[in-house]
Amino acid sequence: MSTLSLRSFHPDDESAVIALWHECGLVRPWNDPQRDIARKLTQQPELFLVGTIDEQVVATAMVGYDGHRGWVYYLAVAQAHRKLAIGRTLMDAAEQRLTALGCPKINLMVRTSNEQVLAFYDRLGYKRDDAVSLGKRLIPDGPGPV
C-alpha cells in the first residue's frame, strides 16, 4: 500500500483540491472555492496542507494563525481513503505547525448537523466551546448566507 505524503498546496493542485472539496460536501454557493484558495495563498500559504498518495490529492487542511488562535478549514479526506487515519494525520500536522508558531489554542467550525465529523473531532480530544459563531460577509462570492 502506498503511503501518505503531506506538503504545502501548489497551484497545480487547484482542480483536484476543488473536486475533493465537492466530493466531501464542503463547497457552498456562497463560498467560491477558487477565491478561497486565492485568498489563502496570500496569507501563510505554507499552512495550506495537501495530502497525496501516489501523487494524487486525497486530503487537505487549510490552516491559519492570526496571532491569537489557530484555525482549520477545509479538512477533507477522499471517500476511498477514509478510515486510514489520514484526517488524524492532517490534524496532527496542523497542531504541530501551529504549536511551532506559538499558537495557544486551535479552533474550527463544524456544522451542527454533521454528527460524523463531530464524532471524529471528539475522538481527537476537541471539546465543544460554549460560543456562538457569528459571521458577516464583507465580499460576496455568491448567493446565500455567510
Image: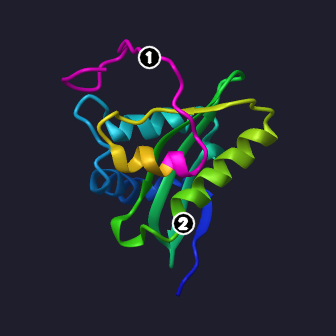
Q: Nearer the viewer, residue 97 or 139?
A: 97
Examine the structure image and report whether residue 141 is included in the region drawn in magenta.
Answer: yes
* Residue wearing tag 2: 85
The residue at the point 37 percent across, 12 percent down is 136
Q: Position of residue 31 (x, y in %)?
A: 31, 32
Numbered tag placed on residue 73 in the rendering: none
Q: Is residue 89 above or below residue 110?
A: below
Numbered label attached to residue 132: 1
| Residue 66 falls within the magenta-colored stretch | no
Looking at the rendered structure, the kind of residue marked 2 is Ala
For marks 2 and 1, the one nearer the N-term is: 2
Which residue is the extreme one toward the left?
143
Is label 1 in a helix, a strand or a loop? loop
Q: Tell me the magenta residue range.
A: 121-146
Q: Position of residue 2 (x, y in %)?
A: 54, 83
Q: Residue at x 36, y 72 (%)?
A: 80
The local crowd at label 2, few if under 14, some if 14 to 19, many if 20 or more residues have their Cα within 10 Å, is few
User: Residue at image x 47%, y 51%?
Assistant: 120
Position of 132 relative to 29 (above/below): above
Q: Is residue 91 left or right of residue 31?
A: right
Name the spot of residue 142 as percent of width and height, x first: 23, 26
State whether the magenta stretch is mostly helix, strand or loop: loop
Identify whether 136 is placed above or below 25. Answer: above
- Say which amino acid is labelled 1: Val
Position of 40 with respect to 18 (left or right) is right
Horizontal relation, residue 98 to residue 106: left or right:
right
In terms of secondary structure, where does tag 2 sit? loop
Q: Quadrant of the C terminus?
A: top left
The residue sitting at 75% across, 29% down in the picture is 104
Residue 46: x, y in percent?
65, 46
